[in-house]
Amino acid sequence: MQGYSDGGADLGQLQSTMRNIEVACTSIQMQINPAAAEATILALSQSPQPYTACRFILENSQVPNARFQAAAAIRDAAIREWSFLSNEERRSLISFCLCFVMQHASSPEGYVQAKVSSVAAQLMKRGWLDFTEAEKEAFFYQVNQAILGAHGVDVQFIGVNFLESLVSEFSPSTSSAMGLPREFHEQCRTSLELNYLKVPSISLYLALTLLMFYCWARDAALSVTNKIMEPNAVIPEVKVCTAALRLMLQILNWEFRSDPTTMKAGIDVFSAGVRHDNASSKRSECVLVQPGPAWYDVLISSGHVSWLLSLYSALRQKFSHEGYWIDCPIAVSARKLIVQLCSLTGTIFPSDSGKMQENHLLQLLSGILQWIDPPDVVSKAIEEGKSESEMLDGCRALLSIATATTPFVFDQLLKAIRPYGTLTLLSTLMCEVVKVLMTNNTDEETWSWEARDILLDTWTILLVPMDGSGGDASLPSEGKHAAANIFAMIVESELKVASASVTNDEGDSDYLQASISGKEGDFFIISFLDEHYSTLLLWFLAAMDERLSSYALIARAAIDVTIPLLTRLFSERFARLHQGRGIIDPTETLEELYSLLLITGHVLADEGEGETPLVPTAVQTNFVDIVEAEKHPVVVLSGSIMRFAEQSMDPEVRAAIFSPRLMEAVIWFLARWSHTYLMPVEEANCLSNDYQQQHQSINSRKALLSFFGEHNQGQVVLNIIVRISMMTLMSYPGEKDLQGLTCHHLLHTLVRRKTICYQLVSLDSWRDLANAFTNEKSLFLLSSANQRSLAQTLVLSASGLRNSEAANQYVKGLMGHMTTYLVELSNRSDLKSVAHQPDIIMSVSCLLERLRGAAAAAGPRRQRAMYEIGISVMNPVLLLLEVYKDESAVVYLLLKFVVDWVDGQISYLESRETASVIDFCMRLLQLYSSHNIGKISISLSSTLLSEAKTEKYKDLRALLQLLSSLCSKDLVDFSSDSIEAAGINISQVVFFGLHIVTPLISLELLKYPKLCHDYFSLLSHIVEVYPETLAQLNNEAFAHIIGTLDFGLHHQDLEVVSMCLGALKALAAYNYREICAGKTGLVSAGHGNSPEGIFSQFLRSLLQLLLFEDYSPDLVSAAADALLPLILCEQGLYQKLGNELIERQTNPALKSRLANALHSLTSSNHLASRLDRVNYQRFRKNLNSFLVEVRGFLRTI
């Protein structure tokens, strides 16, 4: 279909165009030939300068969808053609859109009005950096008159709505795509926030543009407030007020980044301290508002907060008997704005020791109290049917106030008007919410769930120190009492839920198991769920861990009360178990113990996030009067749990009490506790400025830390833990989750610190575990992941031996039986006949998993033993690879063992040893290739999801990882001699390996993300580091690599495209430098003329991508770095392609503009024919300007 450009359009043509668009819109609605209809609409949008036709449709069509599409076409065409529209044409388009929405302000088709208003906002932003201040002021004068109500209430609403669209467009997070660099959007954002603007006849002074918009929105709301409060308020005024409140909220949500009065000094925040959003991980969103001192008059001194609170209070009183009102738009907008004002902080407040901010927060808190206080009355009303929205917004307001201030100031606020502090109110409110949760125990998320999460976030933000020290913030005495009360209520609630779960057949307490089965180290237990639920589980785990961590912060705030509480609760349940043993069903008590172990584990210790966690500050600084370690409350609590856990060693007690589920909690607790308290590294930092208190604190702290140290009870406790670990592995067969926690979490935690390893290797219990690992058949039945982890842990413990010789001997003794078995098996004359017996396959698989674990634990002290183990099984591995070529699972294990072994060894090997390993790897690659060439191809790609094809895909990933490990030898080499001196060229080895592997990797296989990433990561590395070696490949291998590069260049994954552009840059830059040096470049590889054709191909391909295809703006810099050397390599072709583009333009103006842009691309900014850092930077700027100038109209059809 022909386009709809404006050239020579008469009334008949305009009417015909309108009818075509109307028919197309109707056809889409009726699902009649939608493809043709969409093509008709697209033709309008892509036509050159379709503005007259679009205006005609907007002004005359009776079909709302046609008007909507006409507005969209104006937007698309104007953004595309902006660079060659005159200033008059640009202003005319914006004025038309503004006039249209104001003239049709009462139109019932609100979505059409919103679209036209959005188009005006987008065009205003597109020209923001081009328009003069006078032009901007003229536009805004028109908008301001509308907002003030000069043209009626309907137009007033349209004016506010336009500003809402404009602010949304100027915010980078909500702006529409325009095909422009990020710098443009950032410049617009900064200009709107920081530049001053004066609108004639309106402002007597210059005002920040964003601040001016806020004032207009406030004035719009003020202008209709009185009418809203009248008994028979009409809807238009309510709409205006709602829109104005929404606009004010949107402006306060702006990401204020700079303050023109303090740009050099930075932001001087509230002197008493202000919290930042990254202080803790929170479930509820709370954004600090820091607009700067220019906003003081508008938001603080003008009575704005008082007016807003009075407005909401009056509306609340007026509609007090109409429950629905709480959720109507004006109420919701007003409450959200009030909550946002609670987050106000920074230099907007004067430097008066925080008094002004305290008064501001107190005023807001006074107005908010009626939403949440008294908590029991509010809660009862909600349970009887009242909306919970107001109460939840009250909780959010408390969170905002807590975020903007300190615990002390937060607590003092309420004391100005009540006999108790804000922390007491927070505790009372939380207790009421928890009571409701206990009463309405259900799986469905109710208002009380959300309220609990918001209030927990409030406690968290109060209790996380502002300095980011990782300690625990202190509370005033009243706050500590409040924290103790709420923690007691929380524990009571959790125990009730745990007890009730026993009688629930649906297993509502699974959330507690999920919290244990979360990520600890590198381990996830998700085997009990299928893949469909794994994402949901991980989300659930994170939420549960956040909740338990919040509980822990509350407990630590009153730790002198909460630790004895937990000790008492444990003691009661231990006693109950023993008293009712054999008489009363213990299941409820066991579930309560399960919950207590989780809560206590979080209270006593932090996770560590990969680091060794310290004893929580609250534990170290409290209990200062206790210097006898045995009487320290933490020691008492830990000891009672340890003694309870030790009872699991008794078979009779274990059968009666210690179910697999309870043992999971025990193992999890022991791991978390051990990581913090078992043989800790003591610190000598002073924790108090007062000498006497400091002395007492240090003595108490030393008593606690030394009790479980290596010279006290540490070795005894360690021995108990090892024995319990060994028991869980041998006495709970088939319990994969429990065994996984033991192997991946508890045992792995023990070998993280050398101080523990020194003790481990001297324990008889550890030697018993090592012997069982070697000889006990039940341990051969562990899952593959657990086998691997246990082997890794046992080998890592060798770091506790005093010298390398002892460590190597220990590793050989531990793993020797495995290598012996594999060697003997491979030497059997009947290998091919016995190898496929199920028990042999299981034994081989088990031993390979163990060897993988041991290989992953290789380190400087254990390297020699692992090298000799690997060397001893080289030939058996090749023989087994030959025998098991059709057993994909075994083949994969063989490959992964080799990958892990090479990765752990290659950096330490001398040249002779390196040569042996490389020779082995090449033989392995050739053997694998000979068995698998052609088994994965494009013709079979439709069945790749089958198990066999998936295994092959995993094999190829392993082989690529093997080549990557060999590459690392050139980067990290601890050997004493040079591999180059021995005649070893890693680049040749890797390219040879790649030549073997690449025929197995089809383009269809590269659609698999992980394989694709590994392949292009390796390829880009070797092309960038060894471009000269690429020339030595034969034609077939060279062509395959070039083909995959072209494939990756058009991949959907941003990282893959970026890696391909990096490889292309390296390849073209190498070729250009070779030519400049008088050499023949890649032509010398014997590929004939193919390299010239290759660079021509990539130059065409990259220009096509940049000018005509969709891509992320983040790729422009990488594309520029690849394009520059390509242009230098193919200057003649670049000129030819540029001339072809110019000749294709029929519009003389566009032709001239394109010619100038192409010339500037390679000549502006003093660009030279060099490939250095400065020249690359210049070319990036040139390409950005070039794309802004021409990409829009070049994509026009």
Image (cartoon, helix red, strand yellow):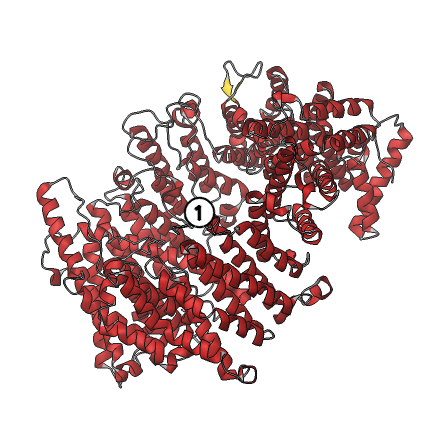
Answer whether residue 384 is visible to the viewer in this image. no
What SS does tag 1 mark? helix
Q: Residue at x 53, y 84 (%)?
A: 829
Residue 376 percent across, percent down from the top left: 34, 54
Is there any visible trace of residue 278 in the rendered image? Answer: yes
Q: Is residue 1106 left or right of residue 1115?
A: right
Could you say where residue 168 lies in the image, as x and y percent from the top left? 57, 34
In this view, the residue in front, 33 or 768, is 768
Based on the displayed image, in which of its 4 quarters is residue 1082 positioned?
top right
Using the image, determine if residue 320 lies above or below residue 144: below
**Residue 662 falls in image quadrant:** bottom left
**In the picture provided, is 852 more to the left or to the right than 755?**
right
Q: In the rendered view, tell whether residue 1147 sits above or below residue 69.
A: above
Q: Residue at x 84, y 27 (%)?
A: 1146
Residue highlighted by disc 1:
390
Residue at the right extreme of this rendering: 12
Quadrant of the rendering where the N terminus is positioned? top right
Query: What is the x, y in percent for residue 638?
Result: 21, 64
Disc 1 marks which amino acid?
Glu
